[in-house]
Amino acid sequence: MSRLPSLLPLALVSVGALASLGASCHRTPAQPPAQPPSAVRDAAPAAQSAPTLRLYFLVDLDGYLEPCGCNQRPLGGIDRAARAIANERNAAPRSALVAAGNTFFLDPHLDERMVWQERSKAESLAGILRGMNLVGFAPGPSDFALGADTWSRLSTAVNAPALAANAAGMQPSRIVDVEGTKVALVGVSDFAPAGGAPAQGAPATTDPIEAARAAVTAAKAQGAQVVVVLASVPRRVARSIASSLDQVDFVVAAREEGNTPPPPERIGRAYLLTAPNQGKHLGVLDLYVRGEGAFQDASDTSAAAARTRLDGRIRDLRERLAQWAHDPSVDRAAVASQQSRLDELVRQRAALDVVAVPAQGRYFRARTLEISPDVEKLPEVQQRIAEYFRAVNEHNRVEYASLRPMPPQPGVARYVGGEACRECHEEAFAVWEHTPHSLAYRTLEDISKNFNLSCVGCHVTGYRQPGGSEVVQNEGLRDVQCEACHGPGSAHIAARGEAARRATIRTQVPGEFCATQCHTPEHSDHFNYETYLPRILGPGHGRPVDWDGGMPDGGRASHPADASIAPAAH
């Protein structure tokens, strides 16, 4: 059993060195710089007093240190999550962090070239989570992507037990004592990724429901007053656990794909909670432990969902009553009955405007904090992330310095670079210089990510293509140049005659080409081919040479996230 006299040292204390955080749990918290309440979009609802315990939870972090910067409003960042926790420390002095799902890696099987970079990122993340006082997590299938040895090092570095009651060799549960209140954390995991085999080194698993039942029974026998199941399993299994085990209070469920967090879902006695993945939101569960019995839901998110449902019913009934008022064939007694029903719905709706605290018994409040760009970064974590990116950049610069792209097959065109295009297409080149595409590589250089394997491919031309560019060997092909859309140009330059030249180059680029290469939902969340295309067109490039509309849509500075010029980083 573990006592938690002082939790979340990284979030509550301004720490100088992350390496020494393990000894910082009992230090006196220092005040971080004040931040406007508006920085966190979802303000905490008012409570009678501080909760008995606040559990912050992350769901399928997927190894993300920070979000892809290409999105117009990127959500996430472990440095921002740490700051969000710090901002709320006065409201919840007794706090802890848990996690469920893939924590260290996104994919269960990694490209060989990504191993060093991904391992380094996972090690950095483990140190950060340790500083945030992660007290337990249920790992996911991708956490074993680099085998059992790497998994062992990471689980040791994070200094929190990996909980999986149904996995061979793993700890089934942990009980933490919060000033006399015993909270059991029970983990269950499924290490088979959707549509694939488990990663090498992942432990064998048994029935998660029965394993959870045994672990919960054991925890209750040890005096646990609150039981939280961390469920890194398919959603149907998480629901079955909630419905089948009558001693469970909460199930924190992984594998949430949506970006809009659902409200708590009551299933039997338990409540199912989740949050958007990759750190876009931070889950918050405030527990008010008063006596025994089932928890009551006093969450504003639940009340908001109920208000939305009632608003819809009220609107529909009002519309029907308005129609019936002008229909003499409708029975007036039935209309009066429906009017009474409407009045009752309106009363129910008004009662939901204020979320009342239960007069007696145990209750909880659950919500999620959106980790938006408005939330400041905690400097200590921000520094750790920057150190990781600098180390990766330098490692890859040396490691891949001699790596060259494959030569094209005989008779197949190779990439020649935009300067070769400029000789005949001066007007089109001038248009390109006014687009964000022309700054793509520089944006990576500015933040030490130009050799990052997760970023460089969308910021150079012909990446890993025959006769194209590589991580380091990309001189003359940096930025998103002409050939990124029109294809390699050597055959076009060598062709003689207008017809031959047209036959050797791609003049029309289909929208799906962009949407599947770099403007994917992860990296370009608002991409729409029809609206984005005009932003790279101009006189001599998709427009008549004498077109008087000027250069593309306000110039490159107006659309810093519209053409893959921002860093794509995890």
Image (cartoon, helix red, strand yellow):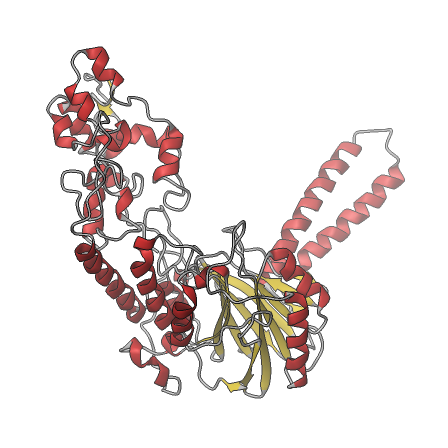
- Left or right: residue 197 compared with residue 117: right
Residue 441, given in percent of the width and then of the height, sits at 20, 45
Q: Nearer the viewer, residue 32 or 144?
A: 144
**Up-down relation of residue 385 to residue 417 (above or below):** below
Total numbered circles: 0
Q: Is residue 290 visible?
A: no
| Residue at the limit of the structure toward the front, as seen here | 410
Residue 304, given in percent of the width and then of the height, sits at 60, 56
- Quadrant of image for the C terminus: bottom left
Residue 194, given in percent of the width and then of the height, sits at 54, 51
**Up-down relation of residue 260 to residue 497 (above or below):** below
- Quadrant of image for the N terminus: bottom right
- Quadrant for residue 503, please give it: top left
Q: Nearer the viewer, residue 547 or 217?
A: 217
Residue drawn where x is 33% and y is 26% of the image: 509
Residue drawn where x is 39% and y is 62% of the image: 146
Residue 123, given in percent of the width and then of the height, sits at 34, 68
**Up-down relation of residue 53 to residue 436 (above or below):** below
| Residue at the limit of the structure toward the left, as seen here | 423
**Up-down relation of residue 482 to residue 405 (above or below):** above
Residue drawn where x is 66% and y is 50% of the image: 309
Q: Nearer the viewer, residue 316 or 505?
A: 505
Q: Is residue 85 visible?
A: yes
- Quadrant for residue 6, please give it: bottom left
